[in-house]
Amino acid sequence: MLFIVAALALMGVLLGAAAHTPLPLFLAAAGAIGAWLLIFFIRERTGHKGS
């Protein structure tokens, strides 16, 4: 239960910070995070074929 409260509090802080950033900066950061997650996903799917 404490973990859920801490996660919700952290999410609230991050969403509050994102609401005050300029839109181009927010979109650039979102694109960078999305690209990183896509690369991670592709590496995880293709990297474990041998094991």
Image (cartoon, grey):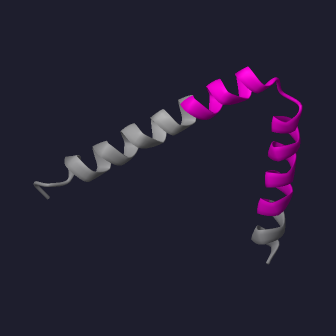
Quadrant for residue 43, please give it.
top left
Residue appearing at x 47%, y 34% in the figure: 35
Residue 14 covered by magenta stretch? yes
Closest to the observer, 39 or 7: 39
Q: Measured from the top left, where is residue 24 in percent x and y?
A: 72, 21
The answer to whether 37 is drawn above or below residue 48 in the figure is above
Q: Measured from the top left, where is residue 40 in percent x and y?
A: 39, 42
Residue 44 covered by magenta stretch? no
Q: Main secondary structure of the magenta part?
A: helix
Q: Residue furthest front?
A: 23
Q: Is residue 12 left or right of residue 31?
A: right
Q: Is residue 19 left or right of residue 41?
A: right
Residue appearing at x 37%, y 48% in the figure: 41
The answer to whether 10 is drawn above or below residue 35 in the figure is below
Residue appearing at x 79%, y 53% in the figure: 11
Quadrant (top left, top right, bottom left, bottom right) of the N terminus: bottom right
